[in-house]
Every structure is written in C-alpha cells, then in structure tokens.
Image: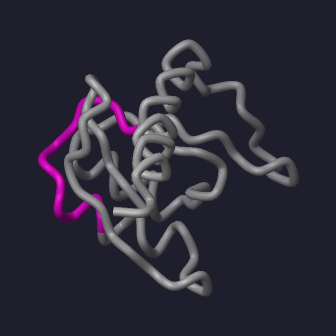
Amino acid sequence: HMAVDSSGLPVDFIVTGGEVHDSKAAIELLEQLPDAEHVIADRGYDSEKVREHIRAKNGVPTIPRKRNSKIGNGDIDWCLYKYRHLVENVFARLKHYRSV
C-alpha cells in the first residue's frame, strides 16, 4: 500500500500480507500522512470507515464504491479519479527494478 503526492512521488508505504484487507491498511497509512485536500483510491479501499477518516482530516475522499453498493458513484469526481494512475506508475517503476 502506497501513498504518493500530486507529482507522483512516494510519500509513505506499508507492506502487508495478502490476508490484510485494503481498508485496514488504508487507515494505518492515512494516520501517518499529512493532511491532504483530496485522497484518491481504488475500489479495494471502499469503506465508510476510510471515507470518515479522510473527512476527519479535512480531506475529500475520491473512492469509487463497489458494484454491489446501494449508494452508487454519483458523487465521484471522475476527472480527479484519473490521477490514480500516479500510484500505479510508482508500482510499475518499482517492478522495473525488482532484481535490486
């Protein structure tokens, strides 16, 4: 789990086992970060606890809800969500140097 800034530079990360749910790791990671105006994450982090934690730090969560959600995604800023690729780019760069 990794957090990046708006320039795509890593800010912090947490390594967890495969059995740890993304939302649990997200809260732990968010506690270590400075306040952010917007927090963008994928559906794996879809949790009301995560959203509440972001709002408590005066941030706006941009996390799509899962397909079975009754609420839907009408409130998601999809233009802002496109910036999620920044964290994916960091993972791609790390995989490039996996032999190090």
User: Residue most toward the left?
Assistant: 34
Quarter of the image where one finds residue 18: bottom right
- Residue 63 placed where, x, y %? 56, 41
Which quadrant of the rendered structure holds the C terminus? Answer: bottom left
Q: Is 94 rendered above or below residue 27?
A: above
Asked if residue 73 is among those painted magenta in the image, a careful observer would answer: no
Q: Which residue is drawn at 17% across and 63% down?
A: 32
- Residue 43 placed where, x, y %? 66, 49
Residue 63 as seen in the image, left or right of residue 64: left
User: Residue most toward the top?
Assistant: 79
- Residue 89 placed where, x, y %? 47, 35
Q: Is 70 rendered above or below residue 83?
A: below
Give the residues in magenta. Answer: 29-39
Colour setting: one colour
Q: Is 84 rendered above or below residue 67?
A: above
Residue 78 as seen in the image, left or right of residue 98: right
The number of discs equals 0
- Residue 62 placed where, x, y %? 50, 35
Q: Residue at x 47, y 64 (%)?
A: 49
Q: Which residue is drawn at 76% across and 50% down?
A: 66
User: Residue most toward the right?
Assistant: 68
Which quadrant of the rendered structure holds the N terminus? Answer: bottom left
Closer-to-camera residue (85/48) = 85
Quarter of the image where one finds residue 13: bottom left
Closer-to-camera residue (15/60) = 15
Residue 54 as seen in the image, left or right of residue 66: left
Closer-to-camera residue (1/71) = 1
Quarter of the image where one finds residue 46: bottom right
